[in-house]
């Protein structure tokens, strides 16, 4: 099957969030099957890590019409195994220090979408599936269905479109005037409500209305978006597309995150040798921070320090578990909101022998913490999918999560006796009582060696790979292709 991904960011070239990981990992996994030709179309940003493609090929210049503007794009091709990237270069739109945040972002991604369609024609690449992501490329399914020049083009005669919603908060609002001015589309699409949202045009809504299939990054997040209580206010339009809307969990890169070959950790280990392995890693981690092991477990949080992540709950819930009777230890690696950073430092100052803090982004240290901690804290307010909890499971570090979004779908919580399937700890209420319950369950479990070992074993053996997720996307693609 021919699959074209249109994405505003993709690893290894560019990344601001999970979208870049998903586009890369999903495409890489799909391209492993020789039956699939996968091409990622993405902007050539000023800071794109093109060193990842030492043999970039110059594909030449193409004309791109943005309504009345006659523009140009230069195309470059990079390869990673069987996976192809087509980078779309235009200095005016993309040679800027950041990926987003400019007054003309809507115009920039209108250019990108139009250029990527022109690139498909230039390359004679006829996609069976055109997979678009978030608001930046949400308009493409609408274009293919509404514009005659695409409806009549044999290149797109069999093309089905898929939209993945990674971040529903960004709606891609543009003034109605730009429907014609950027996309060459009639005003009637605004008047009949197809692309209208809050008296503006929303490119994300356009994707939801026009894509053949829609996905988001976990089954629970799908239900949250459909719920009338959803803050995102997409429930109305998504309800109309309910049958074509699926939640597919993201996976993790099981090669990068592998305790049996991880070059960053003190001692590698497997599901058979985790006890000695984690012990050695814990010792190394404690000594890095100059701390001594207490009687209790080692807890950790690796996260953006953002209100979304429940850091404030942690700061209030954890102290009793650090004190004399419990003697737990806590490591926090993260950076973000100033007020939270200060409060994290204050916690360390209050318990200098029990708390280790690193404010900043440190990949190697994150591996060492995943390997050395006993429990991983993720008391998020909301979490469309989340990957840290899956990485923690891969390292036999039991996640303590609030049941929301993807956390609900990836963690089976230990609730005191049933240990058969449990692979972490979960709690429901987003408050100090909820998290205190989660941490006390962890504390209790830690002192029951047989049950603890069973649950760590479940976590270590869990398959959170992209293989499983990519197979789910492939089934969705096949279903789309079969439909008339
Ligand atoms: P989000 O995308 O909302 O930040 P996820 O759980 O989906 O949350 O992904 C977070 C990723 O970023 C994980 O791989 C985590 O290990 C990593 N990470 C977060 N903060 C840091 C940090 N300070 N240093 C190193 N890695 C970090």
Image (cartoon, rainbow, N blue to C red):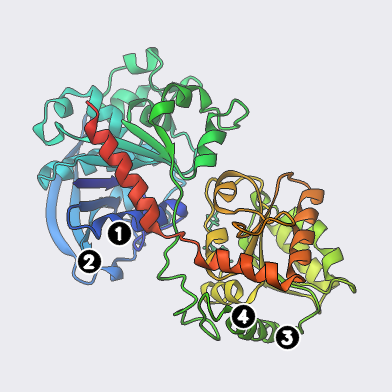
Please name whichever residue, 43 or 349, is drawn nearer the observer in this view of the structure: 349
For label 2, the residue is 81
Q: Is residue 331 visible?
A: no
Please tell me whether mark 2 or mark 4 is closer to you in this view: 4
Residue 290 is labelled as: 3
Residue at 34% in and 57% down: 24
Residue 49 is drawn in which quadrant?
bottom left
* Numbered disc 3: secondary structure: loop
> Residue 355 at x, y = what percent?
76, 73
Q: Mark 3 vs mark 2: which is more N-terminal?
A: 2
> Residue 131 at x, y = what percent?
30, 42
Q: Mark 2 vs mark 4: which is more N-terminal?
A: 2
Please tell me whether mark 4 or mark 3 is closer to you in this view: 4
Q: Mark 4 vs mark 1: which is more N-terminal?
A: 1
Residue at 38% in and 19% down: 194
Q: Quadrant of the C terminus?
A: top left
Q: Mark 1 vs mark 3: which is more N-terminal?
A: 1
* Numbered disc 4: secondary structure: helix
Residue at 28% in and 40% down: 477
For label 4, the residue is 275
């Amino acid at each position: 099957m021919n699959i074209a991904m249109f994405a505003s960011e993709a690893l290894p070239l560019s990344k601001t969030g999970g979208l870049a990981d998903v586009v890369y990992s999903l495409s890489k996994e799909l391209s492993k099957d020789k039956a699939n030709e996968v091409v990622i179309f993405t902007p050539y940003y000023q800071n794109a890590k093109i060193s990842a493609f030492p043999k970039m090929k110059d594909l030449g210049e193409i004309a791109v019409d943005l309504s009345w503007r006659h523009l140009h794009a230069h195309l470059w091709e990079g390869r990673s195994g069987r996976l192809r990237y087509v980078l779309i270069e235009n200095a005016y739109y993309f040679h800027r220090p950041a990926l987003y945040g400019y007054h003309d972002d809507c115009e920039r991604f209108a250019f990108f979408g139009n250029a990527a369609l022109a690139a498909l024609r230039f390359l004679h690449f006829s996609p069976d599936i055109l997979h678009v992501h978030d608001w930046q490329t949400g308009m493409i399914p609408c274009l293919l269905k509404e514009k005659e020049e695409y409806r009549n083009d044999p290149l797109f005669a069999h093309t089905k479109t898929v939209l993945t919603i990674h971040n529903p908060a960004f709606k891609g609002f543009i003034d109605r005037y730009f429907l014609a001015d950027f996309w060459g589309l009639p005003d009637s699409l605004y008047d009949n409500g197809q692309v209208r949202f809050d008296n503006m045009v929303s490119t994300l809504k356009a994707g939801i209305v026009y894509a053949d299939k829609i996905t988001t990054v976990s089954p629970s997040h799908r239900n949250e978006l459909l719920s009338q209580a959803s803050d995102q206010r997409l429930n109305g339009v998504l309800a109309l597309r309910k049958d074509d809307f699926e939640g597919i969990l993201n996976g993790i890169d099981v090669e990068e995150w592998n305790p049996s070959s991880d070059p960053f950790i003190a001692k590698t280990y497997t599901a058979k040798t985790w006890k000695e392995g984690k012990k050695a890693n814990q010792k190394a981690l404690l000594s890095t921070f100059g701390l001594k092991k207490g009687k209790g477990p080692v807890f950790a949080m690796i996260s953006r320090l953002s209100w979304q992540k429940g850091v404030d709950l942690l700061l209030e819930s954890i102290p009793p578990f650090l004190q004399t009777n419990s003697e737990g230890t806590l490591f926090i690696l993260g950076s973000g909101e100033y007020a939270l950073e200060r409060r994290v430092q204050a916690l360390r100052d209050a318990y200098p022998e029990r708390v280790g803090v690193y404010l900043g982004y440190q990949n190697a240290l994150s591996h060492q913490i995943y390997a050395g901690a006993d429990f991983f804290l993720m008391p998020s307010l909301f979490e469309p999918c989340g990957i840290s909890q899956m990485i923690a499971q891969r390292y036999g570090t039991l996640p303590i999560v609030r049941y929301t979004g993807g956390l609900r779908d990836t963690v089976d919580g230990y609730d005191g006796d049933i240990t058969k399937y449990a692979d972490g700890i979960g709690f429901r209420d987003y408050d100090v009582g909820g998290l205190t319950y989660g941490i006390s369950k962890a504390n209790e479990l830690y002192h029951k060696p047989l049950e603890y070992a069973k649950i760590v074993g479940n976590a270590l053996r869990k398959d959170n790979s992209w293989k499983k997720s990519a197979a789910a996307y492939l089934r969705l693609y096949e279903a789309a292709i079969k439909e008339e």
